[in-house]
Image (spheres, coloured by chain):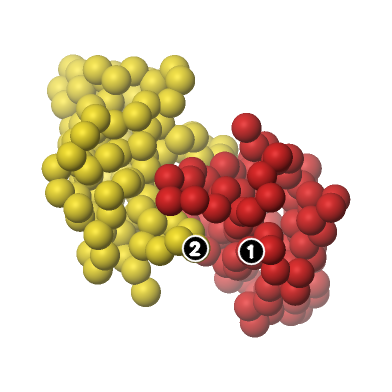
Chain colours: A yellow, B red
């Protein structure tokens, strides 16, 4: 089946630094990928839609300058959390659509900002 | 805009028993997909079952089946012969049919399977 690979699975960074999270579609091309944030025991909150070769589309309330998204190829999207602060600590998940029937998710990244 | 409602924050079931998780949704779309995703403690999102709205027959996948009531906008998940490995968070999700469609998730139901 279609696989979406997400790295790293866990990252700890110091406050004020930037962290990059990668999302790759391994056996299919994805012109669109989605980035979610999930708080403990809560549902997935869509942050942005990553579009290959063009600007990402951000959901209302998501800071574009804080969460930089780049989708430079048909198999790779990256989310960079810039100038991270403890309140950015969360679980981040990406997804992509291998066919018309639904989405496949990455395994997620647990970000801890100290 | 679509909304998905899961009214059961937590449920518990004994091993080998059957449990039903509820989901209702609201949409003006006529063509769409509905999903149940499982998120175990590893937090990997796993597709459990998918239903296409234009199909009247309820989807089944081994021990998992759905009761899809399009007119009532209801989409419940039945888990038969529950196993300890079924312990997880379950999310109901909606997706309009179309290439640029986004998933809309419910708030989730935490299922605990006990001995």
Residue A103 in percent (x, y) is at: 44, 57
Residue B54 placement: quadrant: bottom right
Dot 1: what SS? strand
CA–CA distance in space, label 1 to label 2: 9 Å
Up-down relation of residue A15 to residue A5 (above or below)? above
Horizontally, residue A79 falls left or right of residue B57, namely: left
Q: Quadrant of the N terminus of chain B?
A: top right
- Marks 1,2: beta carbons within 8 A: yes
Residue found 25% across the figure and 59% down from its top? A29
How far across and down, in percent of the image, does residue A46 sit?
A: 45, 35
Residue visible at 34% across and 18% down?
A: A63
Q: Is residue A105 visible?
A: no
Disc 2 residue crowd, few under 14, some 14–19, many 20+, Cα 10 Å: some
| Residue, disc 1 | B52
Report which residue position mark 2 lands on: A101
Q: Is residue B29 above or below residue A3?
A: above
Res. B112 mark: none
Q: Give A54 or B94, whichever is nearer the viewer.
A: A54
Residue A30 coordinates in the image, percent (x, y): 28, 54
State which quarter of the image contains the C terminus of chain B. bottom right
Res B90 → quadrant: bottom right
Relative depth, front residue between B53 and B45? B53
Q: Are marks 1 and 2 on the same chain?
A: no
Q: Residue at x 56, y 58 (%)?
A: B37
Residue closest to the far bottom: B62
């Amino acid at each position: 089946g279609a696989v979406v690979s997400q790295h790293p699975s866990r990252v700890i960074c110091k406050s004020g630094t930037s962290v990059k999270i990668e999302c790759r579609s391994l056996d299919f091309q994805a012109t669109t990928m989605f980035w979610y944030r999930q708080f403990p025991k809560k549902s997935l909150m869509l942050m942005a839609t990553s579009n290959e070769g063009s600007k990402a589309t951000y959901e209302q309330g998501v800071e574009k300058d804080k969460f930089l998204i780049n989708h430079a190829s048909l198999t790779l999207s990256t989310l960079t959390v810039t100038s991270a602060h403890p309140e950015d600590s969360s679980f981040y998940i990406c997804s992509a659509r291998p066919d018309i029937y639904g989405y496949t998710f990455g395994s997620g990244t647990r970000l801890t900002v100290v | 805009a679509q909304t998905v409602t899961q009214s059961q924050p937590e449920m518990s079931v004994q091993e080998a028993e059957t449990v039903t998780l509820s989901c209702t949704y609201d949409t003006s779309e006529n063509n769409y997909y509905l999903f149940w995703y499982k998120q175990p403690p590893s937090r990997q999102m796993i597709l459990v079952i998918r239903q296409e709205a234009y199909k009247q027959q309820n989807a089944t996948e081994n021990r998992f089946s759905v009761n899809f009531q399009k007119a009532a906008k209801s989409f419940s998940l039945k888990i038969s012969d529950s196993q300890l490995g079924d312990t997880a968070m379950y999310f109901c999700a909606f997706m309009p049919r179309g290439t640029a469609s986004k998933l809309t998730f419910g708030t989730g139901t935490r299922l605990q399977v006990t001995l």
